[in-house]
Image (cartoon, rainbow, N blue to C red):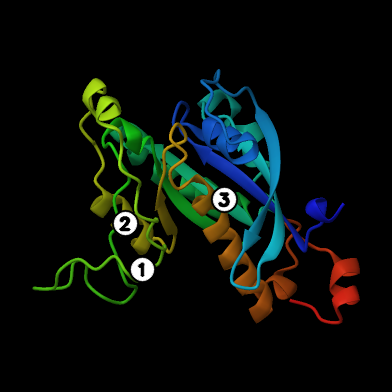
Amino acid sequence: MESLSWDYILKYVLLGDSATGKSSLLIRLTDDRFDLTEPTLGVEFGSRIISVGEEGKRVKVQCWDTAGTESFRSITRSYFRGAAGALLVYDVTRRASFDHVTSWLEDLRKYADENVSIILVANKIDLCTSKPLPIPSIQYGHPFPAPDTPLDTSSSRSPSPAPAPDVPPSTTQSKELKSRQVSSMEGALFAKQHGLLYVETSAKEGWGVTDAFEWTAREVLDKVKKGDMERKKPGGVKLNETRQNKGGRCC
């Protein structure tokens, strides 16, 4: 079936502290629904085909959702190898989950391929706001924020989310919002300092979830075009050679 065809298969890993919503993000991606999940024991798997970039490349993302508890850490590290993309997830209402991002990133840099594309995911923003807000623009090589310059969200390392639809008054009024423990500015600045993509998500509402996977895939395909992946030969990128040959061109 054409709907099941793909141009590339990319291996992804989801990592971060327990209860940051990694499994819920994966369920939202694969099934487009929200479900309260039990803590992941070891590793869980899911996949979906998404359209990436202006050329509309069909990319099948195969995602390994890893446990966030220390007792499974040695097991989950083995899944980092060969990953083309990684979602590093924290909960914006739990400061500790953000503080531990550095440790998770060190593990990823140590055990994953050198060319892995990583996106920092600030999850559970629905607990703090009634609708998603534009992501701060932090340009590489420029101070943040630039002196006497208003914040510009039109062009950034991570594309800004589409404007959120108006939220029904009943939804807003009946929901008690929590205080946010990690600001957008702090999360985006951390991403800039470490060369990561950055996105804010809500698995419950579906905000930014597809973006997290699509933006990472876009960066991976850019590396493929530049030939970086050919030189490194990662196991997490598979080209559908049959489709490429049929089209008479590659990438």
Q: Image height check: is 143 above or below 179?
A: below
Name the residue at 86% across, 68% down.
Answer: 243
Q: Position of residue 179 (x, y in %)?
A: 20, 31
Q: Quadrant of residue 5?
A: bottom right
Reading the chain from its start, which is encountered first: label 2 or label 3? 3
User: In the rendered view, would you say 244 is above or below 193?
Assistant: below
Q: At 37% from the left edge and 57% from the top edge, which residue is drawn?
A: 191
Tell me whether circle 1 and circle 2 mark residues in contact (CB < 8 Å): yes
C-alpha span from label 1 to label 2: 8 Å
Q: Which residue is mark 2?
A: 135
Label 2 element class: loop
**Amino acid bearing label 3:** Ala
Assign a secondary structure to mark 3.
strand
Task: Specify the amino acid type for callout 2.
Answer: Ile
Mark 1 element type: loop
| Residue at which label 1 appears | 156
Q: Is residue 115 visible?
A: no
Nearer to us of marks 3 and 1 is 1
Circle 1: residue type: Ser
Image quadrant in which you'd find residue 51 = bottom right
Question: 10 Å neighbourhood of mark 2: few (<14), some, or many (≥20)?
Answer: many
Q: Which residue is mark 3?
A: 86
The crowd level at tag 3 (other Cα within 10 Å; few <14, some 14-19, many 20+) is many
Q: How many marks?
A: 3
